[in-house]
């Protein structure tokens, strides 16, 4: 169980920026969980990821349970079993047990709360550009940055988790133990969910950055805009250190024409389109395309092929983070704010 392929910084050994971020995570989230700590080999990336999560999901006017429902639904359509379990726990901690069950079983029409059911239907459509519910979203203009920010963040984090974590956050995959283990985890997080939190508390972790135009949905909420601007700046930096400009351009072109569908066949689709690359660039392009467009298809062999050329943790983390965020911000372009 746990993080694969990289070595995260352990909480008791954390220093500097990593220690600062870990302190905030423990205070506001309840526990230093693996989807955050897997980013710790690159401290600025850890900080950017934490602030994007905190400022969109943990604070604001939209109830936490509504945003957890969005996170759980997106995790399900992205085929991320770890994240589905994790957000089922958070829904339980938010007193939304029936919604957790409905999402976990894919029985969305059993959600009796109309407002939350519409948000779940919206989340289900986030990989279907042009759909009616995306064009006419079921939330207010004030709520849009929180809801879209939560969706974009989980389209990012699902990809990272599929690549680097095991199938569940629980200490056992035994189905007989799942219910009691989830109950214990619920108790751990429920206190942190109820704790009062201040918007923008995380922004001091990184210097200010300019918000890219394609993240303009965040503009009306300064704390969310500031968080995603900083994360975007860090992602651009780690991407330039981890992928050549040729590979970055190639992946961006492929993501630009993506329609949200995951390939249903084997990984042969990616092999066919990377023929112009050889050696380390071929391994990098393959890994980046897989995590961006078919994260559930990433296998141990793809990671090993990349690490044969680049054994450093920060290189692997940089490729995965850059490609995952490239896909997530593309999805963000499909998510419209309500018309005035």
Image (cartoon, helix red, strand yellow):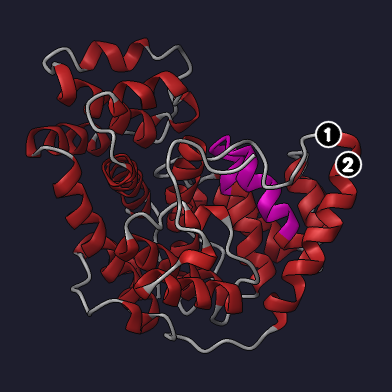
Q: Which residue does the image show at 66% across and 46% down from the upper left?
A: 84
Work out whether residue 112 can be spotted.
no
Give residue 177's mark.
2
Q: Nearer the viewer, residue 165 or 290?
A: 165
Q: Is residue 285 left or right of residue 265?
A: left
Residue 174 — which label? Answer: 1
For the point 84% across and 51% down, the residue is: 181
Q: Position of residue 129 (x, y in %)?
A: 40, 43
- Residue 8, position as x, y percentages in the image: 45, 52
Q: Is residue 236 left or right of residue 307?
A: left
SS assignment for the magenta stretch, majority: helix
Q: Which residues are magenta?
A: 74-89
Q: Residue at x 74, y 61 (%)?
A: 91
Q: Quadrant of residue 18?
A: bottom left
Measured from the top left, where is residue 308 in percent x and y? 27, 23
Asked whether disc 2 touches disc 1, contact meaning CB atoms under 8 Å apart, the reply is yes
Quick one: 46 or 195, which is closer to the camera?
46
Q: Is residue 336 above or below residue 108?
A: below
Q: Residue at x 58, y 64 (%)?
A: 32
Asked whether residue 261 appears in the rendered view, the answer is yes
The tally of labels here is 2
The vertical placement of 295 against 108, above or below, is above
Write down the quadrant of residue 319 in the picture: top left
How many residues crowd mark 2 within 10 Å: few (<14), some (14–19), many (20+)? Answer: few
Q: Quadrant of residue 339?
A: bottom left
Residue 11 relative to residue 295: left or right: right
Q: Is residue 75 magenta?
A: yes
């Amino acid at each position: 169980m746990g993080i694969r392929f990289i070595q995260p910084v352990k909480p008791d050994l954390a220093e500097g920026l990593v220690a600062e971020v870990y302190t905030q995570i423990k205070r506001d989230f309840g526990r230093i969980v693996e989807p955050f700590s897997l980013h710790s080999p690159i401290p600025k990336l850890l900080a950017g990821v934490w602030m994007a999560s905190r400022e969109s999901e943990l604070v604001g006017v939209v109830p936490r349970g509504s945003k957890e429902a969005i996170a759980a639904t997106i995790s399900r359509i992205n085929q991320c079993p770890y994240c589905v379990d994790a957000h089922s726990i958070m829904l339980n901690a938010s007193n939304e047990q029936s919604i957790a069950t409905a999402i976990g079983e894919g029985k969305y029409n059993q959600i009796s709360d109309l407002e939350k059911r519409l948000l779940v239907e919206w989340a289900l459509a986030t990989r279907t550009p042009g759909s009616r519910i995306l064009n006419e979203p079921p939330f207010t203009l004030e709520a849009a940055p929180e809801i879209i920010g939560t969706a974009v963040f989980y389209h990012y984090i699902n990809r990272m988790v599929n690549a680097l974590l095991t199938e569940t956050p629980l200490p056992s995959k035994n189905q007989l133990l799942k219910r009691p283990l989830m109950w214990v985890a619920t108790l751990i997080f429920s206190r942190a969910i109820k704790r009062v939190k201040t918007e923008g508390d995380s922004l001091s972790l990184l210097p200010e950055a300019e918000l890219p135009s394609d993240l303009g949905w965040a503009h009306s909420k300064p704390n969310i805009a500031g968080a995603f601007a900083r994360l975007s700046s860090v992602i651009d930096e780690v991407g330039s250190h981890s992928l050549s400009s040729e590979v970055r351009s190639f992946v961006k072109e492929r993501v630009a024409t993506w329609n949200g569908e995951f390939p249903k066949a084997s990984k042969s689709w990616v092999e066919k389109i990377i023929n112009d690359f050889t050696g380390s660039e071929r391994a990098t392009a393959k890994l980046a395309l897989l995590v961006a467009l078919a994260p559930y298809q990433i296998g141990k062999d793809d990671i090993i092929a990349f690490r044969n050329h680049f054994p450093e943790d920060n290189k692997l983390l940089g490729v995965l983070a850059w490609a995952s965020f490239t896909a997530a911000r593309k999805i963000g372009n499909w998510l419209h704010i309500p018309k005035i």
